[in-house]
Amino acid sequence: MFGNDYRGKKVIVTGAASGMGKATAELLLQLEADVIGLDIQPIENPEMEAKHINLLEEQSIRGVVDELVDGSIYGAFLCAGLPQTFSDVDVVTVNFGGNRLLMELLVPKMTTGSSAMAVITSMTLGWVPHAEMLAPLINTHSMAEAREWAEASAGVIADLGDSYIVAKEAMAAWATMQSTRWIQQGIRVNCLCPGLTSTPMMAHFEEAAGEALALLPQPLGRNTNTEEQAFAMVFLNHPRSSAVVGLSLYNDGGSAAALMTAAAAGLM
């Protein structure tokens, strides 16, 4: 399906050491892309250029991006994040503040006229109704400000569920709004919303929110796997997906559809 459209294109994949990031990087290598893998953990794949990055530290993010040549990156696949078993402040700092900064810094590094970014935001059905509560976080201007918001907003985080939900909904909101601006520079931005996926991080999700996850409908009858999510990421950034802008793609085996159907039925 993807043909040779990725051949020779330089791409960034965060979280490339494991899970969805690893699967995405491996698929892109099969498609003959020039892959730069970023992770805080060692990347054990000699086929890609590996760089250490810590999304909790601004200096680390800036250092990695400074090494990239302006106008050299076709695609960015942002797969890295922290589960809610970490501190609320660190989860918000990484999943929103760090990813946002990386995306902003990558803009001058993207190829002129046609490039793409895709970021994993999980099942963020709630960001539109929660936009007013999330606005103070979304409107921060730096990682430090995002961290300060998290430190001062334990009540808001609890009201919305947990820090993972807050950070992912904020990222979905920010990325969706930013997509309408960056497309004017030829940069497409989209979000991938996986449901329950069998990755090393799943154990953390089950520890933090096992009861809630058990109630999530799964019409597909199983968790998705990392290869299925990688395929969706590669689709979102594919050169032929040139009109796909600001999309939140629910690649979740029908979980979101089941929730929305149940909600709609309750209104009838």
Image: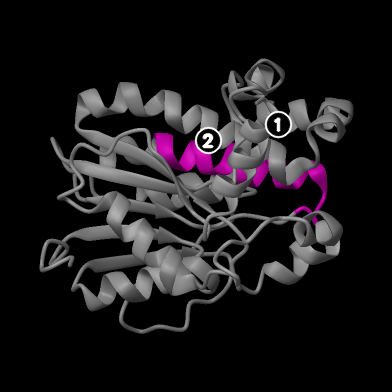
Amino acid type, residue under disc 1 in the picture = Gly
Residue drawn 53% across the image and 69% down it: 224
User: Left or right: 111 with respect to 29?
Assistant: left
Magenta stretch secondary structure, dominant: helix
Residue drawn 32% across the image and 21% down it: 181
The residue furthest front is 268
Is residue 55 located in the magenta-colored stretch of the structure? no
Amino acid type, residue under disc 2 in the picture = Ala
Q: Position of residue 146 (x, y in %)?
A: 67, 30
Q: Is residue 16 above or below residue 262?
A: below
**Earlier along the polypeptide chain: callout 2 or callout 1?**
2
Residue drawn 72% across the image and 19% down it: 133
Q: Is residue 81 above or below residue 128?
A: below
Q: Position of residue 232 (x, y in %)?
A: 37, 59
Q: Is residue 199 above or below residue 209?
A: below
Q: Which residues are magenta?
A: 84-104
Q: Nearer the viewer, mark 2 or mark 1?
A: 1
Q: Which mark is residue 172?
A: 2
Residue drawn 22% across the image and 50% down it: 74
Q: Dot 2, crowdedness within 10 Å: few (<14), some or many (≥20)? A: many
The residue furthest left is 4
The answer, for residue 195, to whether it is visible in the render is: yes
Q: Which mark is residue 266?
A: 1
User: Left or right: 133 with respect to 15?
Assistant: right
Q: Helix, strand, or loop for circle 1?
A: helix
Is residue 94 located in the magenta-colored stretch of the structure? yes
Q: Quadrant of the C terminus?
A: top right
The answer, for residue 110, to whether it is visible in the render is: no
Q: Position of residue 245 (x, y in %)?
A: 30, 34
